[in-house]
Amino acid sequence: EYSVMLTREDGVKEMVCAVKPIRFDSVSGDAVVVFSANESSQVNVKVAESAQVRVWSSVGVLVGEYFIDEGENVLNLGDNSGLYIFEFIFEDGKRLIERIVL
């Protein structure tokens, strides 16, 4: 279980609601599952079909671009913890956005 401390521009700090990560053993349709595999910045991504993945930092910097196959894939995002935005672009042009905190 984890949560994130957010600081507003006016200096007020608040914790977001606690999130308990769960592992999905299968995906169907155009579903995407993103989860952290361990305490490093290694991330498992499970997709029902191959896709291009762009990973962005919380400040809008492109961290990496990957081409992943159907099934489970492992991405290494380096040693930086924080919020990441995953942009999935499927072969049919459909786009999907997922977020993960490392």
Image: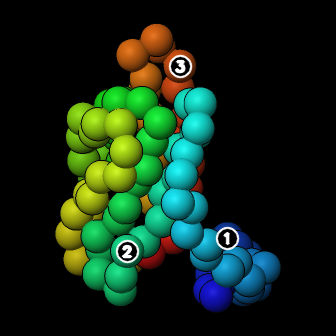
Q: Secondary structure at mark 3?
A: loop
Quarter of the figure with the N terminus: bottom right
The amino acid type, in three-letter code, at marker 2 is Ala
Mark closer to the chain start, 2 or 3 = 2
11 or 4: nearer the eye?
A: 4
Q: Position of residue 93 (x, y in %)?
A: 47, 13
Mark closer to the chain start, 2 or 1 = 1
Q: Which residue is mark 2?
A: 37
Q: Residues within 10 Å of mark 1 (few under 14, many from 20)?
A: few
Q: Are marks 2 and 1 in contact (CB under 8 Å)?
A: no
Task: Tell me, for residue 94, which label it has, or none.
Answer: 3
Q: Is residue 39 above or below residue 99?
A: below
Q: Which residue is mark 1?
A: 9
Q: Indicate the colouring scheme.
A: rainbow
Q: Secondary structure at mark 2?
A: loop
- At 55% from the left edge and 69% from the top edge, which residue is drawn? 23
- At 46% from the left edge and 11% from the top edge, which residue is drawn? 92
Q: Quadrant of residue 11?
A: bottom right
Tell which tag, 2 or 3, sits nearer the viewer: 2
Q: Position of residue 42 (x, y in %)?
A: 29, 70
The amino acid type, in three-letter code, at marker 3 is Lys
| Spatial separation of the CA atoms under disc 2 and disc 1 | 33 Å
3 or 91: nearer the eye?
A: 91
